[in-house]
Image (cartoon, helix red, strand yellow):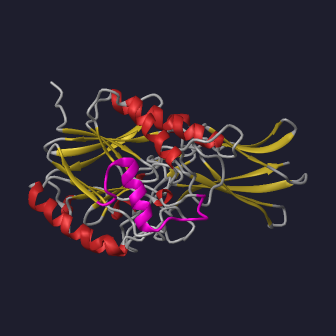
Amino acid sequence: MEQKPLLKIGILGDTHCGIVEKGNPSYDFYTKSSENLKISLEYLSSSGVEVVTFVGDLIDMAKKKHANHFHKIIDRAFAGKKTKMVYTIGNHEFWTDAPCFALPIDKATEFFKEHTGQEANSHQKINGYHFITLAPDTDNLSYKNNVAWLRRELKKAVKDSDGKPIFLLTHGRSMDDDHPSVRQNPKFRHDNRFASKEMYAELKNYPNVINLMGHTHASILEEDSILQNTFTTIDCGCTAYSTPPHPYKGELSFVPMGLVAEVYLDKVIFRRIRFTDGVEVKSPWTIDLPINPNEFRYKKDRFLGPKPIVFKDKEVKVEKVDGENYLTFFNASGEDYIEGYLVEITDSKGQKVVEERILNFYLDGLDKIEDKKKVKLNLEKGKYRVKITGKYSYSAHIGESLESDIEV
């Protein structure tokens, strides 16, 4: 007989819900984000979660019509059910007219409480498990002024939790500079611009904390979305849309994904779900209980060492598509999906004429990745040398490169 979880939690990243009249520049975006929220909540409702958590940016602007629209979608999905909602305030809860005008913290938290019925800094116990939400001081996601409150609440939770996980919901990050989530290039998504060192200074003493975060719009398919140092952080992605990581440019993904956590006596399983079809898009993350930081399996050292990337099909061709020349090649393989490729092309004189990074578009799900890659060429007729290098999302290590001569 299959073991039933003691608690089942739906976890949604940024939802950016809003509503405007047709013809407004934001109409298409709000239509998509609202539909994604509806799809996500209907899935969670049908799957029997007892709690739904939101990690900030619930609405796109701090306006009553957006908030009312957001809650109507929730009410429809959970009509007649007693499912508990846990809300977190994000930077968009401060904004009233894009990022041009931000409410002060007292006005933002007052509006947040008015439309959610919950304090921005909150601590509640649900089915024996502690849920803490922490508000930032400003829309820049500083948490300095609320750390003393967090310290008091963590002590209460630890005293009462008997070794159980403590769920801390924040919109911003909590790790320090030494954590692998901080990619050194400041343009990378998992950077430290919004990490709170003050928050980290408190959390590092609490291995039972599982910090659920939002803001980055990263994909939950990325393995560095879960990281453990002396506690655990999980980047919960974005329900409204996922963005490609720097330095890749390209389309966004409007396929809603999120997490479903199943809490058992001996473990917490975080399942990565595509809400459109209920598919578990990748193997789940598992945290063993009782939590022992010496046995953490998602520490930064799992990213160290060589990460082989193999091009099983080494064919590189120039093909015409609708009268345009494209460089085509087949996907490489490795221990995980390949995030993207660096394509370098040199001419007969050894001069580099192309240096382009292309995303191996995985954001809709690994089952949606196209096997064949193509790069548009704007080259004069002649002979060229091509070098194609793949990389993983979580490592700067470059794997095997594919090299070939081509003629345009």
Q: Report the label total.
A: 0
Quadrant of residue 228 in the image?
bottom left
Q: Kindly tell me whether residue 96 is visible in this rendering.
A: yes
Residue 311 higher or lower than 172, as above or below: above
- Residue 131, position in %: x, y? 24, 53
Q: Which residues are magenta?
A: 97-121
- Residue 386, position in %: x, y? 73, 55
Q: Residue furthest top?
A: 1
Is residue 113 found inside the magenta-colored segment of the image? yes
Q: Kindly tell me whether residue 17 is visible in this rendering.
A: no
Residue drawn at (68%, 37%) of the image: 22
- Residue 37, position in %: x, y? 47, 38
Of residues 43 and 304, which is closer to you in this image?
Answer: 43
Residue drawn at (83%, 44%) of the image: 325
Is residue 406 found inside the magenta-colored segment of the image? no
Left or right for 317, reference 72: right
Of residues 105 and 326, which is closer to you in this image?
Answer: 105
Of residues 178 and 39, which is closer to you in this image?
Answer: 39
Q: Residue furthest right?
A: 381
Of residues 223 and 174, which is closer to you in this image?
Answer: 174
Quadrant of residue 324 in the image?
top right
Residue 393 higher or lower than 147, as above or below: above
Image quarter in which the N terminus is found? top left
- Residue 371, position in %: x, y? 60, 37
